[in-house]
Image (cartoon, rainbow, N blue to C red):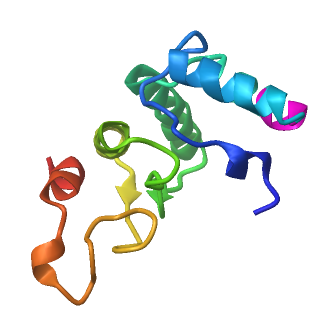
Amino acid sequence: GGSVYARFHDLPFPARADDPAIARLRAELHAQGDGAAAAALDAEIGEGWSVARIDAEFATLADSAARHDTSIVLNEFGALGFCADRQSRLTWLAAVRRAAERHGFGWAVWELDQGFGLMGDRRDAASVDLDMLDALTG
């Protein structure tokens, strides 16, 4: 709630600093006088958000886990429906899941029918979003 990240919305994935959607959000944040959120956006997007970046970050984590003889489990890595468009969410889920598996990490998705939207209603098995399921199972 109080985090600057809570003020982000409509984020594309993958994205670069010069992405039009990022430029729109940056301008909106500045227009609202929210320099802290705009600075956080620039810091996060500055390196680019891409499949390659996820893999590089996970390679670093895997190296650290190996040095410390420990395991890695991602307990949540979804993208909220109000923060990103559907295709970006699908691409993000698939990219993170593949990178986690490539580096030997366990993973879990904890939520079904709220902001992460793996299904429309947990009481209705027919409401499972098959594209989301495919992104998670490949």
Q: Which is more toward the observer, 90 or 31?
A: 31
Q: Position of residue 34 (x, y in %)?
A: 86, 36
Looking at this rendering, what residue extends furthest in the left direction? Answer: 126
Residue that sits furthest to the bottom in the current view: 123
Magenta-tinted stretch:
34-38
Tell me where residue 73 appears, x and y as whole percent.
Answer: 46, 59
Residue 105 or residue 95, whichever sits in front:
95
Point 17% across, 54% down: residue: 137
What number of labels is visible? 0
Residue 127, above or below 30: below
Asked whether 114 falls inside the magenta stretch, the response is no
Q: Is residue 70 above or below residue 95?
A: below
User: Residue 133: x, y in percent?
Assistant: 18, 58
Query: For the point 53% across and 24% down, which residue is it?
Result: 21
* Magenta span main SS: helix
Q: Is residue 36 magenta?
A: yes
Q: Quadrant of the N terminus?
A: bottom right
Q: Is residue 40 left or right of residue 73?
A: right
